[in-house]
Image (tube, grey):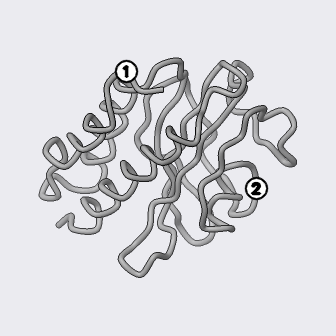
Amino acid sequence: MLKGTIHSVEQLNHLLDEQDGKMTTLANASAFLNDLLANINWVGFYLLDNGVLRLGPFQGKPACTKIPVGSGVCGAAVAQNQTQRVDDVHTFPGHIACDSASNSELVVVLRNKEGIPIGVLDIDSPLFSRFTEEDANNMERAAEIISNKIRQTV
């Protein structure tokens, strides 16, 4: 559920400047998505570093700083190299509860130009079944734009 339209996601192409560097780009992307998405309580990035996802820029309460690949929703997304849309995180095997107020989650993979995972876009909601297939498609497009921008950072 976007506060705007899919065209709003395309605004990332204009907002994000690959010359700003990876952290600045991800910080602006998380702020933009936090404003764009309704009924969420956390949005941010985890970046792959030697087999571990490490916390990157985000909007929301303090979060887990390290997630092993294959653990939790974020780790599953990287291990499977595919989006994870979870209606009830409490039923997800191995879910990592960073915020007990989160009930559903959408995790989209960031990829390098070869299609290999480099991190994830993680979005949590206090609502059960918050994320739709349309949300997943929109955030996959956002992740594609963001991945392209951080690949080109200097």
Q: Amino acid at mark 1?
A: Lys
Nearest-to-viewer mark from 2 and 1? 1
Residue 79: x and y in percent read: 68, 67
Residue 89: x and y in percent read: 77, 35
**Horizontal arrangement in the rendering, residue 58 relative to residue 61 (left or right):** left
The dot on residue 71 is 2
Residue lying at 55% horizontally and 21% vertically, measured from the top left: 41
Return the residue at label 1: 3
**Image quadrant in which you'd find residue 81:** bottom right
Instruction: Using a 10 Å C-alpha cutoff, classify the residue at mark 1 as few (fewer than 14 neighbours), some (14 to 19) or many (20 or more).
Output: few
Query: Is 69 above or below relative to 115?
Result: above
Q: Secondary structure at mark 1?
A: loop
Residue lying at 28% horizontally and 56% vertically, measured from the top left: 22
Residue 30: x and y in percent read: 37, 36
Q: Amino acid at mark 2?
A: Ser
Residue lying at 59% horizontally and 55% vertically, measured from the top left: 83
Assign the C terminus to one quadrant of the image: bottom left
